[in-house]
Amino acid sequence: MNVIEIRGATKVFNPGKGNQVEALAEIDLAVRPGEFVTLIGPSGCGKSTLLRLIAALIAPSTGSVEVNAKPAEQARLDRDYGMAFQTAGLFDWRTVSKNIELPLELMGWTKGDRRRRAKEMLELVKLGEFATHHPSELSGGMQQRVAIARALSFSPALLLMDEPFGALDEMTREHMQDELLRIWKETETTVVFVTHSIPEAVYLSTRVVVMSPRPGNIASVIEVDLGQRQASVRDDPAFHTKVTEVRVALRKVEE
Amino acid sequence: MNALKGFSAPIVTGVVLFGLWEGVLALFNPQGFVLPAPSEIVGALIDNWSEVYQGARITGYVVVSGLLAGIIFGVLAALLVTRFRTANETITPLAVAINAIPIIALAPIFNNWFGLTSARSNQAIVVALVFFPIFINTTRGLTQVDRSQVELMESYAASRSRISREVRIPNAMPFFFTALKLSTSLAVIAAIVAEYFGGRQDALGPLITQSAGLTRYDDAWAAVLAGTTIGAVLYIVVTVLERVAMPWHSLIRSHREET
Ligand SMILES: Nc1ncnc2c1ncn2[C@@H]1O[C@H](COP(=O)(O)OP(=O)(O)OP(=O)(O)O)[C@@H](O)[C@H]1O
Ligand SMILES: [Mg+2]
């Protein structure tokens, strides 16, 4: 059984109006349990739109999207996935810790459990001492880390992440990549991940989906098998070969 | 204590201003005919204390009750409009039409409706005037929310009312308080001007017109001072409430000021 099954999904925004946008054309994509799939492609090619379709935050214009063998909308209502958005989307009126607790509150966790989990997650993203701060007191990268902690807090079996590491410095980024890989391996999560960074895509994924713009489409799919992922992989020739392969595919798309 | 922070500067400004006023009048206008000195106004206030105090009570009651009712109606309408499309389509044009009416011009008509000597008509003027800014601003705050925050809540399958509670209402708070601060001074003006035309004869409005008619300008100013005090007290109360209700907001502000 596939975790995600997209069949002939298209998305047209504002159909029939002057500002009509054909964002996605006939997407077919299946994601198996435990896969780490990365979406990469030029800005505006519909990566966020595709992620929103999977999350059932928008409905496809035609075609179907299934998550865990049920309509995506049902999966959303069943809280089958966790999502981290391109913009951090933190709530200024909640402290950092309370922001992370938000999904847990909605899922009816007890106060003590929520506190404990928020603390763990803050340690994970190295923001332990900022628990009682408000988001406005944090830098952009720190805010993004809080958003990641929030997405991971309830250990969803499916993680949808839209450029979650975009605002992070290189060292923090690598740290977060390794943490994400560790969580992915330990909990056998399925991940769909959007990024603009080719090395990041290759380092993290089992499969890189290269998308082309106007209208958004899947141009090519590149399988990645670098064995046991660890920092040394970044220096591996096989890693660089894959990076080049993705780069070539992207260059074709941009032309 | 923290909630009261920031009031010292206006107090100092006020003291300096009144000192200057007193000083300039003492030097150039010893008769105090056109503009009485602060000391004369305070003197008139002491002499007519019971009258002014009674007037301030009546007008204060009109202002506060009208303000409260205006807030309740404004917020309720805003909640309805954001929740139901049909409410939006009926209430919003109606509110815009009402706002186009110079409400204060209705005072004599309201007197006819509610009785010439009753405070009801003055209250109605205040309610009508306060309603609009509260309604418009609160609606704006409830609807102009960060899209990703709403999507985040939807990704958790949160109910509509939960999204309102977690996202829309907190987001509307700064909008609401901005409108409320505006409304306090508006309410005092509305009440006093409405009282010029009718309502209870022992209110501040009639006190001002009667004193001015008898060229007792220092008495008129004493009544104006009482009206000013009502406005100032309300403004301070709202500011304190704002800081208590939105600790995160004053935080944002203080950070901006520091940097
Ligand atoms: N809500 C919307 N209404 C109208 N058009 C939209 C909407 N959301 C996205 N679009 C359009 O759909 C296209 C794809 O947008 P999308 O956000 O999916 O791109 P993206 O690949 O995520 O880009 P980026 O890498 O810059 O984040 C764009 O042309 C965009 O203008
Ligand atoms: Mg995007």
Image (cartoon, rainbow, N blue to C red):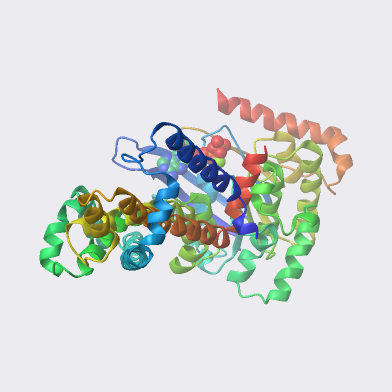
Q: Quadrant of residue A107?
A: bottom right
- Which quadrant, please, contains the N terminus of chain B? bottom right
Q: Position of residue B128 (x, y in %)?
A: 25, 59
Closer to the camera in the image, B258 or A84: B258
Which residue appears at 30% of the width and 54% of the height?
A: B132
Q: Can the viewer see residue A93 in this picture?
A: yes
Q: Position of residue A117 (x, y in %)?
A: 74, 67
Which residue appears at 85% of the width and 32% of the height?
A: A237
> Number of marks in the image?
0
Q: Quadrant of residue A254?
A: top right
Which residue appears at 84% of the width and 37% of the height?
A: A234
Q: Position of residue B228 (x, y in %)?
A: 40, 53
Q: Name the side, left or right, on which A87 lies relative to B96.
A: right
Residue extending furthest right? A232
Q: Name the side, left or right, on which B102 lies relative to A145.
A: left
Q: Name the side, left or right, on which B106 lies relative to A203.
A: left
Residue extending furthest front? B31
Q: Can the viewer see residue B139 in this picture?
A: no
Q: Is residue A73 above or below residue B12?
A: below
Closer to the camera in the image, B57 or A205: B57
